[in-house]
Image (tube, helix red, strand yellow):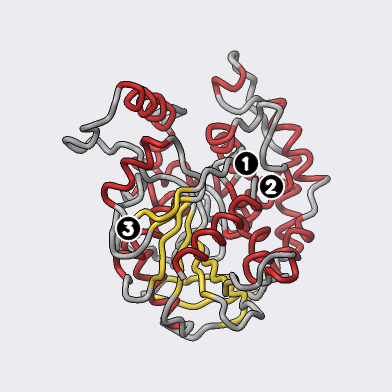
Amino acid sequence: MNEIKPFRVDIPQADLDDLRARLRRTRWAAQLPGGWSRGVPVAYLRELAAYWADGFDWRAQEARLNAFPQFTTVIDGQPVHFLHVRSPEPDALPLVMTHSWPSTVAEYLEVIGPLTDPRAHGLDPAVAFHVVAPSLPGFAFSPFPEPADERPWSIERVARTWAELMRGLGYERYGAHGNDAGALVTPQLAALDSEHVAGSLITAGLGIPTGRPGELDGLGEKELAELEELTAWTTGGSGYGPYLAARPQTLAYGFADSPVAQLAYLVERFKEFDGWGSGEEPVGRDLVLANASLYWFTATGGSSSWTYYEGAAGLPISQRAVPTGVTHGGPEVMRRLAERDNDLVYWGQAQSPSHLIGLAAPGTLVTGIREFFRMIR
């Protein structure tokens, strides 16, 4: 692990001006029939792009990020950006938090305060955390070096990188939390560094059938029906996953050259995950545009899809090396399946209107993290 250097987000004004100019001279596609069934509607995207150009305040979002101490280092040849916010509480537990795809570390800005300084937020100070929130490799301020490292960025490689990061920060015992892509990294980190990881907490993903022989033995008709409905939902959608796995470079040109192409892609993912565009949008447009801006300014729309083209997208592994928890668990049948291969000590029933829980329902995430780690400390 190389030297740790302080970091602040400071996007040049010329880059902001260029973004607005590109947005204003977008060459718009014609509207196809079918509304959202054909992709993001033109009228919807035009309105959002116009707001990005003339109403959205990037500097305010930049200030939100810079309100927290940030750093960069290099581990295994990869630049790693991370937030590192220490708690004023003397017995705080270090906690590494891994964000989702297609998101950024900004996903956690609303939860860092209550986790690190619960006393200031009216919470019991006996449960507090030193938060380390890295940007996944290839995302935002953790860009891939050029030329790109030809070694695959597997989930295991990310987990080893996080273990080295926490070691380099001097943390002998720490907790781990993750959502979506982060939910894959977190149990892998627990399995690889069980000597130091106190517990593995994810938002969801355990208990989804994997197709292993005998996996569903002993389940009743009602439970099997619940799992069939769940599987149908998780395997639906536009089919973006296979394309990202096969031809990410082709998409990357549009992401790097056109902010509207990048925005349309992200909005469609939000739509599939959360019903974005339905009129009841769980994540505010400023947060969506902050996310899109981070991808745009860092030109990481293409590189952030590595979980697909490296074959790392999928379901979290099971492990019994450390205690496991799930904050936003599904039906009871999923818990039964998850218990078979994990030391499952916490199955939260919190609800979120969005797959990006830290953005849409940060309070439920704070509660789940505090409840789980209170149990295992």
Query: Judging from the image, what secondary structure is the residue with disc 3 in?
Result: loop
Q: Position of residue 272 (x, y in %)?
A: 53, 32
Q: Which residue is mark 3?
A: 154
Q: CA distance from mark 3 to mark 2?
A: 28 Å
- When the figure is inspected, residue 326 is found, relative to residue 372, above or below; the finding is above
- Number of numbered discs overlaid on the protein picture: 3
Find the residue positioned furthest to the right: 55
Residue where numbered disc 1 is placed: 263
Give the residue displayed 49% in from the left and 68% down from the top: 96
Above/below status of 92 relative to 218: below
- Please say if the residues under marks 1 and 2 sit with CB atoms less than 8 Å apart: yes
Q: Residues within 10 Å of mark 1 (few under 14, many from 20)?
A: many
Label 2 crowd bin: few (<14), some (14–19), many (20+), radius 10 Å: many
Mark sitting earlier along the chain (3/1): 3
Q: Earlier in the sequence, mark 1 or mark 2?
A: 1
| Residue hosting label 2 | 289
Q: Nearer the viewer, mark 3 or mark 1?
A: 3
Image quarter of the N terminus: bottom left
Q: Amino acid at mark 1?
A: Leu
